[in-house]
Amino acid sequence: MRTDTAHEHWNSEWAGLAADSKWATPEAEVLDWAMGFVPGSRVLDLGSGVGRHALALARSGHHVTALDAASEGLAEMRRKATAEGLTIAALEGPMTDLPFDTDSFDHVVSWNVIYHGDESVVRASIAEIARVLRPGGTFLGTMLSARRVPVELAKAPGREISRNTWVFEGEGDKIHPHYFCTARECLALFDGFEPLRLEDREHEKPGSWHWHLVLERCGG
Ligand SMILES: C[S@@+](CC[C@H](N)C(=O)[O-])C[C@H]1O[C@@H](n2cnc3c(N)ncnc32)[C@H](O)[C@@H]1O
């Protein structure tokens, strides 16, 4: 059974996105991280959605590539980029098989993306990030925290379909498999990276715990 199916939900979400959606505004944490970049850095926005981070990074003069499996999000990002005269290389595809050469990027951002699937999907996505990010390059991303599982179970029945991988009944993207992990599990998955920051944070909703990670690719 395929577990990397959540982009189907997001494709519908992006097709009907309200202009004032939170998904149109870049996260301050991403902007702060990018403040330290050398001008003209090569940056990958992996799972770019409607491109809020890709667009912000392109506005700052970086060479931005965006990849997502949901075509509607990429179409919206292309519309905005064209309107602003920005150049972003936009590709449709899975995060588990990136169409880029080894060491292609100085930085990779993947906000609320790589936990969409079971452990094999998560591991494949991280292996691809490690491959395309140059040694010494940085990764900023989020993962779902294991602390969140009981919070989700209080909202809707759910079942663990494989280690750490949960599906919940009801509405929203959690009818698709999501991977939840502890800090130790998270760092073990990112073997090959040096942790610069790891913090469990709630997003907008109470109990919406996410690991926020900033890591450096080893070997730089
Ligand atoms: C929660 S949204 C976040 C979008 C964007 N990173 C942001 O912060 O605005 C998750 C995104 O990951 C994409 N995605 C989910 N599974 C994917 C996969 N297997 N390959 C590529 N993209 C995927 C979805 O299509 C969606 O655009």
Image (cartoon, rainbow, N blue to C red):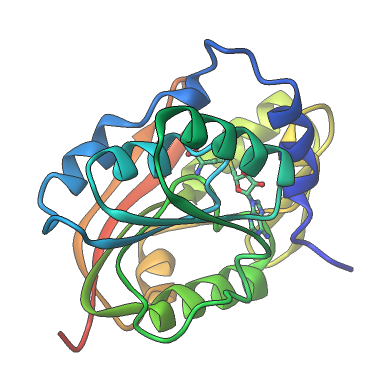
Compared to 47, does 208 lie above or below?
Answer: above
| Residue 41, quarter of the rendered image | bottom left
- Image quarter in which the N terminus is found: bottom right
Counting from the top left corner in percent of width and height, residue 212 is at 33, 47
| 102 on left or right of 10 | left
Q: Does residue 64 appear in the picture of this structure?
A: yes
| Residue 160, quarter of the rendered image | bottom right
Q: Nearer the viewer, residue 64 or 206?
A: 64
Counting from the top left corner in percent of width and height, residue 121 is at 65, 70
| Residue 19, quarter of the rendered image | top right
| Residue farthest along the right direction in this orientation | 1
Counting from the top left corner in percent of width and height, residue 82 is at 50, 35
Compared to 130, does 71 lie above or below?
Answer: above
Q: Does residue 208 appear in the picture of this structure?
A: no
| 157 on left or right of 206 | right
Please tell me which residue is depicted at 38% across the width and 74% down the height of the picture: 190
| 203 on left or right of 175 | left
Counting from the top left corner in percent of width and height, residue 198 is at 26, 54
| 80 on left or right of 33 | right
Compared to 64, does 52 lie above or below?
Answer: above
Please tell me which residue is depicted at 41% across the width and 78% down the height of the picture: 132
Q: Nearer the viewer, residue 219 or 153?
A: 219
- Image quarter in which the C terminus is found: bottom left
Q: Nearer the viewer, residue 180 or 176?
A: 176
